[in-house]
Image (spheres, rainbow, N blue to C red):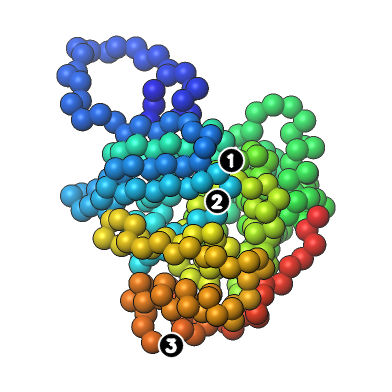
Amino acid sequence: MSPHAPATDPVPATESTGPALAADPVPPPARSIDHSGVRVTGLRRAFDGRVVLDDVELTIAPGEFVSLLGASGSGKSTLLRAVGGLDPGVDGRIEVPERTAIVFQEHRLLPWERVWRNVTLGVGGGDLRRRAVAALAEVGLEGRADAWPGTLSGGESQRVALARALVRTPQLLLLDEPFGALDALTRLTAQALVEDLWAEHRPSVLLVTHDVEEALLLSDRALLLANGRIAAEFTVDIPRPRPLDHPRLVELRTELLAGLGVHGPARRGADRATEETATPRSATPPRENHR
């Protein structure tokens, strides 16, 4: 079984072109299908001798929303790519649901294809346009199905990327800093949209982010990755929707910032470790009626 393909996928036959090579004594990482959530054990990844992930252990329950934070270069996206089956160079065991979708910071739309065809890119089965329009309706873009990607705003393009994930009805949704390229107001709207979609469909979610407030507003748990391992875990036991001035959220923000090396009074905007400027936020993110 390929370590980075669903367990039900057939292994393609290969034609021998020379003498057989000795078997690799090190077993490849196992990535199998598990409908009970995500389980990562003993995950290790090194690049040119530099260990980025070192015996990582991670679990995500069915329907749980988990955020992953850490300094730049700590291995957050490397871990997400491993869970998504995009990195054949990892060692360890990864158990994931059968249907997985990934949304990246770049929308990665094909400019020569209409929006609806971008949504169904790689999707099998029939009635693709109807399925694409239904997914676009969930993100408020059903009227843009026949538009060209070049005519969309940044926020609209990222919503198309979300629709492309939704059309696959994922049991696991991987979000790799999907709001990082958006302006502050569009970012707040996109965060609220993701929270609404998660509440409706209830996939397991792993969100990679640099934004502490984003993690605390959206997640059931926030994890801190440092020195190649999960260094700290924070349970966000605050009812939704979450006001930013909730005493428990302020306390968690202070603890997470300290874990990221930002000390002193918790203040809005300070948690954007990789951004040069910060924009004040309202007590709760604005919501639009997308459906």
* Residue tagged 2: 64
First of labels 3, 2 by sequence position: 2
Quarter of the rendering containing residue 164: top right
Judging depth in this view, the residue of 102 and 170 nearest the camera is 170
Task: Bin the neighbour count of mark 1 within 10 Å (Cα to Cα): few under 14, some 14-19, many 20 and up.
Answer: many
Judging depth in this view, the residue of 122 and 254 nearest the camera is 254
Q: Amino acid at mark 3?
A: Pro
* Residue tagged 1: 171
* Residue tagged 3: 265
Q: Helix or strand or loop: what does disc 1 sit on?
A: loop
Q: Helix or strand or loop: what does disc 3 sit on?
A: loop
Residue drawn at 21 percent across, 13 percent down = 20
Where is residue 187? Give x, y as percent. Answer: 62, 68
* As drawn, 99 above or below 102: above
Q: Amino acid at mark 2?
A: Glu
Number of on-image labels: 3
Task: Bin the neighbour count of mark 3 within 10 Å (Cα to Cα): few under 14, some 14-19, many 20 and up.
Answer: few
* As drawn, 200 above or below 6: below
